[in-house]
Amino acid sequence: MNEQDMLQDLGDLLDPPSHTPPARLRERVLRATAQPAPRRRGWWGSLARPGVDGGRDPLAPKAGGRRPAPWPRRLAWAAGDTLSGFGPRRLGWRFALVGGLAAVIAAGMFVVQTSTVGGLPPVANAEAGAVLHGAADSARQDPELTARPDQYVYVESVTWYPKEGEPGQTTVRTWLSVDGTHDGLVSSGLPDRTGAAEHPLPGCRDGRAAEWEPGGTLSPDRTRPCTPEPGYLAEVPVDPVRARAKLYEDTEGDDRDQQAFAAVGALLTGGYVAPAARAALFTAVATIPGVQVVRDVADAAGRLGVAVARTERGTRYELLFDPATYALRGWQQRPVDGSMDMRMLRPVAFVRVAVVDRAGQLP
Amino acid sequence: MNGVASSECTDAQMIEVSLRDSEQFAALYDRHADQLYRYAYRRVGPGVVEDIVADTFVAAFRRRDSYDLACPDARAWLFGILTREIARHLRQEKARYRAMSRAFTSAEEEDPALRVVADVAATALRGELAAALARLSAGDRHVLLLIAWGDLTYEETARALNIPIGTVRSRLNRARRRVRYALGNSNPMSTSEERG
């Protein structure tokens, strides 16, 4: 692809949901041009309300009248921020908090949050708390998978991702090295640009991992520095207080709660989290301010479920559960104003997880 | 630009008519709104696009008596006005490209499993391209995008921006060189920590 094709490709991604502008825009333009003498006030005829609209740009939205409330100008900031919340930052969960430090943090919480029990802040939202309580119970009932370092975590999921400018749905099978040092494999139903449907995931040995060749195979001689990324996330704490600290450990700035919520998605899509640790994560999520329940949300596989969601800066993250059993189902994000097809943002629906001996081996 | 020997009502005729009858302006809107809206949406996103397109048409309506009626296609003229409106939202535009860049970068980083499957080269490059767009000077970006996304010719771009065609060429060359440089310097198989 040369840069002109790339520009077209990027342009396609930035396109509006519909190429035809909304009817209200036409109405707005025709109304504004209906009167021959352009005056800066009173163009809106009966809609203009002196004293309320005085001094405002005549094209600006009206709070009342026949204008729909969520007029674009109110969303002006969203133009820049719509996408900004996408993608949880890379978490430093590989550098797990040592127990002592976590205890210090937990103790600090206990002092500040006097109304808490055992150092955990109160549940932020009763409805979300109930769902997450059910999710924690459900997680604890899962059998715990045990694995040797040389084995693989097999994760099967359904996802969407950009394919020639269009979202494409596929089942993805991934074999993640349990300790992160062995070469894994990822296999997708949709071949990539080079026609390959399977790609190796380089293991990290002695601080080096093989580079990918342009075709997606591993280079025999070129390597890059790395840190092993275990597919079995053994370091996720089973204690909710420490789990909460983990979610917040790499957060910074003024949207730390959103980053902590995003961290849950990063963990759950990053490998296998054992039942007790998953339960601890869900219990911790219930204490993140701003979480709420959204019902009848479709996951990437099309299953309707209940979402524990958090919205900030125009992006809603959704942690999805089975509406009856509260079993974990998926993770996804969407721009709340619909400015981008959420399927382009790789929603993930979990299908199954297992431990196998070899990359490529089905359970 | 000569007058056009078409049986259709040209833009110039429509605008001429709209001098007498502003209702005719609707025809001009219907003819060009889709293109202008799509182009502006790409550059500034959903938050301000309606304001920008509406302001463009209203400005066009107010300036209709200064439109060169010898020039039959109003597209370049409208894109010129649109560009001035977009230029007032430079911050939103750049933020949109940076957010796009971050979205693609973080989507890659987020999930080791999907890093390879999801057409990693193109995806990583998208992030680089979006970041490069944000870094271009406004003048260079106008030229690059009017041609790439607005489908304007060099001549139309020159007319839209009211600059000589030689300047269009030099700006376009510079913009393409910079974009190419940004794409060429990125390794599509790796993700970088400092972007945008």
Image: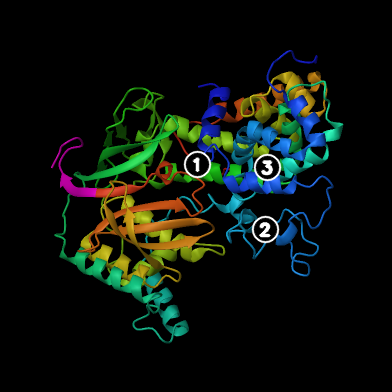
Confirm whether the magenta stretch covers residue A356. Answer: yes
For the residues beneath circles 3 and 2, the answer to whether they share a chain is: no
- Using the rendered image of the protein, determine whether residue A233 is visible from the camera's viewpoint: no
Confirm whether the magenta stretch covers residue B49. Answer: no
- Quarter of the rendering containing residue A120: bottom left
Instruction: Kindly identify the residue that appears in the image at 77 percent across and 60 percent down.
Output: A56
Q: Is residue B149 left or right of residue A121?
A: right
Q: Amino acid at mark 3?
A: Val
Q: x, y (%) of residue A167?
A: 39, 37
Q: Is residue B117 left or right of residue B109?
A: left
Q: Mark 1 vs mark 2: which is more N-terminal? A: 1
- Quarter of the rendering containing residue B108: top left
What is the chain identity of the residue bearing mark 3? B
Question: What's the magenta region?
Answer: A351-363
Instruction: Kindly identify the residue that appears in the image at 26 percent across and 39 percent down.
Output: A171
For disc 1, the marked residue is A17
Q: Eyeballing the image, is A168 above or below A26?
A: above
Question: Which of the labelled discs sits on residue A43, or is there none?
Answer: none
What is the chain identity of the residue bearing mark 1? A
From mark 1 to mark 2, how far is it between C-alphas? 22 Å
For disc 3, the marked residue is B53
Q: Residues within 10 Å of mark 1 (few under 14, many from 20)?
A: some
- Quarter of the rendering containing residue B115: top left
Instruction: Kindly identify the residue that appears in the image at 63 percent across and 55 percent down.
Output: A77
Which residue appears farthest toward the right when viewing the image? B66
**Label 3 element class:** helix
**Label 1 element class:** loop
For disc 2, the marked residue is A61
From mark 3 to mark 2, how far is it between C-alphas? 14 Å
What is the chain identity of the residue bearing mark 2? A
